[in-house]
Image: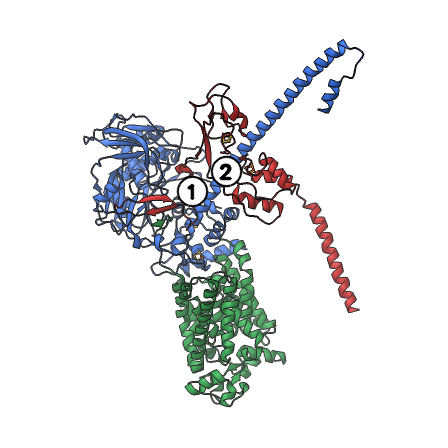
Chain colours: A red, B blue, C green
Amino acid sequence: MNILFAVLLLGGLALLAGIVLAIASRVFHIEGDPMMERIDAVLPQTQCGQCGYPGCKPYATAVASGEVDVNKCVPGGERAMLAIADLMGVPPKEVEEEAAPPMLAYIREDECIGCTLCIKACPVDAIIGAPKQYHTVVESHCTGCTLCVEPCPVDCIDMLGKPEVLEEWTWSAPGKSRLVIEDSAEGETHVRAA
Amino acid sequence: MSGLLDRFTTLLGKGAAKGAASSIELKAMIGSGGFSGGVHPKQMKITAGSPIVQSPLPPRLILPLKQHIGQICTPIVEVGERVLRGQKIAKSQGYVSAPVHAPTSGTVLAIEEHAVPHPSGMGRLCIIIEPDGKDEADESLPPITDYRAEDPGVIRERIRLSGIVGLGGAVFPTFIKMLRDHRHPVEMVILNGIECEPYLTCDHRLMLEHSAAIVRGLDIIMHAVEAQRGVIAIEDNKPDAIAAMQQALADIAFEHIEVRVLPTLYPQGSEKQLIQSVTGRQVPAGKLPLHIGVLCQNVGTTRAIHDAVCLGQPLTQRVVTVSGDAVPSPANISVRIGTPIPFVLAQCGLEDLSGVRLIHGGPMMGERLSRLNVPLVKSTNGLLAMRQEALYSENAVEEPCIRCGHCVTVCPVGLVPNELAWHCRNDQFDRGQEYDLFDCIECGCCSYVCPSHIPLVHYFRYAKGQVAKIEKERSFAELSKARSEARDNRLAHEQAERAARRSKVRKQQAGDAAGEEVSGAETSGDGKEDKA
Amino acid sequence: MSLLISSPHAHGGDSIRANMLSVIIALLPAAGVSVYLFGWLALFLIVLCMVGCMLSEWVCLKMMGRPLSRLGDGSAALTGLLLALTLPAAVPWWMALIGCVAAIVLAKQVYGGLGHNPFNPALAARVVLLISFPLHMTAWLVPMHAPVFAAVLPLNLYDFSQCWNLFWLGPEAIGKGLDAITMASPLGHVKTEWSRGIGAVEALRNYDYSYLDAFLGREAGSLGETSALALLLGGVYLLARHTISWHIPVSFIVTVYVLAALFNAVNPDHFAPPLFHVLAGGLMLGAFFMATDPVSSPVTPRGQIVFGIGCGLLTWSIRTFGGYPEGVMFSILLMNCAVPLIDHYLRPRVYGK
Ligand code: SF4
Ligand code: SF4
Ligand code: SF4
Ligand code: SF4
């Protein structure tokens, strides 16, 4: 008798909790962006294709549909991977390729023949120029994806490291300084990046 | 409930426990009528008794084009041009900016990148001047002797033209702080004579030796912002400065200005903490001191304002304290801005710099410089040369946090530094922001008392930098995304147009054909196009 | 060569070691009283626990590949001392050693070592012992100088060889049963009398309880918890050195006092008087030395007050309504669980917000 009572009581409680949960999930339901959009929002939008897809949005679509791993975006690195894994609710997976330091494309203008092929290649319209004119890269728009290098028939596009400026310098985590200060006999302190 | 607790804590705190940190030299205090928290670092004001001396002209002056918070200046002189002392050589570019003036007469040698005092050791564009030794002055700014008769706007314009920035270290362009806003009239101007950083004594000496100029400077500021009350705030560890300022006030018979003596407590010289100590009110988050009717100016800045207005001299010199255990004869020196730091150190007998660590500013908030060959700039209030062994930050080994709570007790802002550092270390920057990361003023009290030698401030700086970086990357990504989508749309559009054109042409062709072959209505061409 | 390090470049000179050392110093009066009361036995137990904890710490550090220099921070030695002071003088040596291992291994190192343990290691170890060996852990050796037993003192605890045998071989070795040399603590006595329907006041009367004895420490109890005076001295030292702040001990003790006073006022016959509660058992030791353990207590002043109040409420409730005569230990451990929550919700007010 007692056992019956206990079973009934627990069963009743479970039922009650279930009902409450069901109602709560209805009432507090949040309409989210579709998964693809949310993944796209954490990608670096370099549009470089290193993930094996023609751009960030196609990769986001592929991840959202579950057809590809979360660790394929190279420029996004660990941070993007973790964010995607979090969104998808899957375990994180190490990013295999290391991202190159940020770069910018430079066109050696005197060699440019104005073929417009690089303009067509650039996924973010960062190159301006008209046919048979010098072309030039708008630095503030270039994502450093290198897609314009290949098509150039006269190889006049260089990928150069993005210049570091003082205003954008930030502290690295303690004990992981990028700067190592060395003493020398002359008493001048030399700095090198570690 | 929590408000009650708060009151209970502070009430008891004032009497019972004078704070937290359990170190030997350190007696932290809660309350003291001012802000909560704070520490008592060892004073080390060894130069308090040394009169200000004038540094000779260096062989070269290096003037960075940005020595203030805001936009960088553009040079208005050419290489090879002769300049005079006080001549403007770089003009403001944009609103939040302050021009640069030549500190002496001479020739412009170069305009090029040169290392500046910054922890990164990086450089920026500088104008390099070779002095000719004549020190001829440019007299384009006439002295304003009767400043009370001038319009406040004229005074502010003079301050702007003179390149004056906050000389306490914040280097915010001063004229902007003095702009008037009719919804928020300035009731009180506080002269910040606190100088709570250990070692530094330049403001102290200025108050002793130039008390009249400083009091006048304060009066100028009050006139410019039309304030009625002036308060000179000095800590009780500088009794001679207190006396000097009182004497100066009595001499000039300024009755609208009073001297307020405050108990010594670091970081009382920090603007918001000082305002709380003096007025008992806090500047609401996200607001400026102006919004509660207060304006703070540093002693050095006030003196510079006096010189700019009454003497017509733009900001080309400042007083710095050169001290530290590696300096044979520590001193307060009046130096021309742009003087190379090794030259200044040599004035104090320090020539061999091997094994010397240079700190730009005081030990609590100053920056360790990774390069020594940099010029002295407007923000340089102190130069500390320390032997490697003496520099705590170099020898400390981080140990696990024992949650002793000392950092919480001393934080003048009311943060929980240990939790905050935990989130920063784990790169949980969202959580860090929930724990008010950006309210940290980087005063260093928490690191100072931490028994585990955790570089808390370093974690906060790291996190702040990362947040800024992530934010920037995110907005760049958004921009790129928009551009890429625009391009995709354009391409799709072009393709559609092309397709439409093609189909039109085809239709036309088909129509022509149909016209000729009336019998065959359904042509193979149409069929093909349907499939395509 | 050096890495770039941010300001501040000055430091107050505080260290973990200095903190631990000042707690050890603050415990010296209590340790002294324990030797005065329990003679050689107290000394043996203290040395054994300190050595035992440090050895366990050394083994753990070695096994986990952590820097052995951590042994020098004094936290293991402090845990050993604290553990010893919470033990009854008559516990067998092996039981104390088990306590040491439990404190260091179970309560500290498995959580990640110093700074990561959610509970006070010494307290956690004591609970392990209490649950495993309830009999030994509630048998209080008759102390020297206790007026209650002055006439019939069963043992001379200042006799080295007798203590040596008792310590290593147990009471049987000196021809006595455990019962013969132990007595009930005042708290235990009150609890038993309650169960027989006798009120606290009456119980204390037939125990010959005196406030002065309780204050000075001349009563039965754990090594270091008997003398409120010695503990107060240590507590004041810690407060003066700013090693601890007043928030936890004050709110803890005041809460117990106020609660006891309230109920005592309602029914003076049944409920024990407030001063009795404050002086009895491990309250002083707990309030000044256990609840203030930095690692397992809140960091914010407001949180510390809430923590202290919680400890006080639980202590009084367990003592009055619970199954155990003493509740200090359990209440602190229970409140330790709430620390993350307390710390999160009771942060100080941020400037200007
Ligand atoms: S690798 Fe990353 S940045 Fe490059 S296209 Fe793919 S998702 Fe975009
Ligand atoms: S300019 Fe070249 S490297 Fe830069 S975004 Fe365009 S295609 Fe990529
Ligand atoms: S960070 Fe340092 S000062 Fe703050 S609680 Fe931890 S050990 Fe104590
Ligand atoms: S550095 Fe920041 S967290 Fe540390 S005490 Fe100062 S304001 Fe508080």
Say whether residue B162 is visible: no
Q: Residues within 10 Å of mark 2 (few under 14, many from 20)?
A: some
Q: Residues within 10 Å of mark 1 (few under 14, many from 20)?
A: some
**Farthest left residue in view:** B134
Q: Nearer the viewer, residue C220 or C167?
A: C167
**Farthest top residue in view:** B516
Q: CA distance from mark 2 to mark 1?
A: 14 Å
Q: Quadrant of the N terminus of chain B?
A: bottom right
Beta carbon of the mark 1 residue lies under 8 A of ligand 4: no
Q: Quadrant of the C terminus of chain B?
A: top right
Q: Nearer the viewer, residue C39 or A135?
A: A135
Residue C136 in which image quadrant? bottom right
Q: Which residue is mark 1?
A: A170
x, y percent for residue C105? 51, 67
Horizontal side of B430 relative to A37 (left or right) equals left
Q: Which residue is mark 2?
A: B473
Horizontal side of B505 relative to B161 (left or right) equals right
The secondary element bearing badge 1 is classed as loop
Chain letter for the residue marked with disc 1 in the picture: A
x, y percent for residue B265? 36, 52
The amino acid at mark 2 is: Glu
Residue visible at 22% across and 37% down in the picture: B58
Compared with B434, C78 (above or below) is below
Compared with B507, B141 (above or below) is below
Compared with C325, B84 (above or below) is above
Residue C66 in which image quadrant? bottom left
The amino acid at mark 1 is: Thr
Q: Nearer the viewer, residue C43 or B226?
A: C43
